[in-house]
Image (tube, helix red, strand yellow):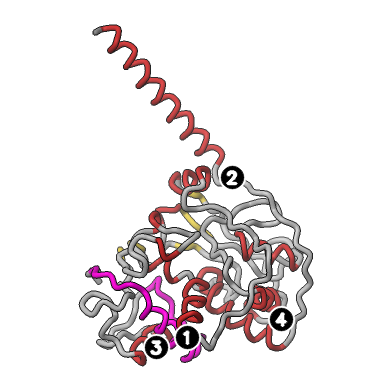
Amino acid sequence: MKKVLRYLLIIICTIITLVGAAAAFIAIRGVPKQKAGQISLKVEATPQRLARGEQLASLLCKSCHLDPNTNKFTGKHLVDVPQFGDIYSKNITRHTEFGIGRWTDGELAYLLRTGIKPDGTFLPLMVKLKESSDEDIYSIIAFLRSNHSWVQPDNTRQPDTKYSMLTKFLTNTGILIKPVLYPKALVPQPDTANAAAWGRYIMIQLDCWMCHSKDFLKLDPDVPEKSLGFFGGGNLMKTPDGKDIYTRNLTMDEETGIGRWTEEEFIKAVRFGIVPNGEGLREPMPKFTNLSDREARAIYAYLKTVPKIKNQVSR
């Protein structure tokens, strides 16, 4: 019996040692670097692309990268997901040293799709536009090269991000957070005649499903619809002043979701941040004023196809 206990103790100690060594390795290694792809691309800055790029930048980039102190895309401190670390977004102005002024169009496209910088640095929390059309990617690049005030060269440098052990673990194991493969084929524009399909395209592009599903740690980046509590809300985030806030249930459940909202009420909430009872939506939920009514209606049409979830979220 003593011999069995001795062997059992040895096994337990060995497991503890291995787990400790693995944890130490992950902590020291941090978020692993990746191989940056080489994309041959030269984007023509047409008026249509510049206009579309400005809209997309206001929807996708502004909330994280627009520094209120500079009124430029010089990055800022992001406090809404502290479980992933002390996060600072990057300077994406046209500054050649501290921004993206030296990057090629191909390098920008690769980052927007995969989250991987030219030097192999992986940005795990950045939006990855894997399903966005090629034309939308080109439009964003055209805007980032433009003379818009948001992207004028600025030498502001944000502190380095300090990722949490959770983020380091997830990126080293490839669980949940991993680089996205660059598309092998052209990605077409969405079919805007199909309102629900167009709405899904917009919701995936804006990453609405990530915040409005049950838990960041239970998301399925490959098939968003398989995420736990897809659009059922209840995901814990932080307001700018550090208070807990749970995301809203966006399914059409009549009791706990938005099933009783009219289309016009939904548009008002999405674009201007006002819900049917007159209250304003709280940050980190942005106001998508640059969405058109037609785009907001497409989102509403898509949400009507999402299975209802009964989940009463404390607001």
- Earlier-in-chain disc, 3 versus 4: 4
Image disc number at residue 147: 4
Q: Is residue 282 visible?
A: yes
Q: Which residue is mark 3?
A: 267
Residue numbers of the magenta segment = 283-311
Among the 4 quarters of the image, the one containing residue 61: bottom right
Q: Amino acid at mark 2?
A: Pro
Q: Nearer the viewer's eye, disc 1 or disc 2?
A: 1
Q: Nearer the viewer's eye, disc 3 or disc 4?
A: 3
Q: Amino acid at mark 3?
A: Ile
Q: Quadrant of the C terminus?
A: bottom left
Where in the figure is residue 294, as x and y percent of width and height? 48, 91
Image disc number at residue 195: 1
> Residue 148 or 108: which is nearer the viewer?
108
The answer to whether residue 116 is above or below residue 256 is: above
Q: Amino acid at mark 4?
A: Asn
Helix, strand or loop at mark 2: loop
Query: In the image, what residue occupies the spot 36% across and 80% down?
Result: 304
- Earlier-in-chain disc, 1 versus 3: 1
In magenta segment, residue 61: no
The answer to whether the residue labelled 1 contacts the one labelled 3, judged by CB atoms less than 8 Å apart, is no
The answer to whether the residue labelled 3 contacts the one labelled 4, judged by CB atoms less than 8 Å apart, is no
- Earlier-in-chain disc, 1 versus 2: 2
In magenta segment, residue 290: yes
Please tell me how crowded label 1 is: few (under 14), some (14-19), or many (20+) other residues with Cα within 10 Å: many
Image disc number at residue 32: 2
Residues at marks 1 and 2, CA–CA distance in whole angstroms: 40 Å
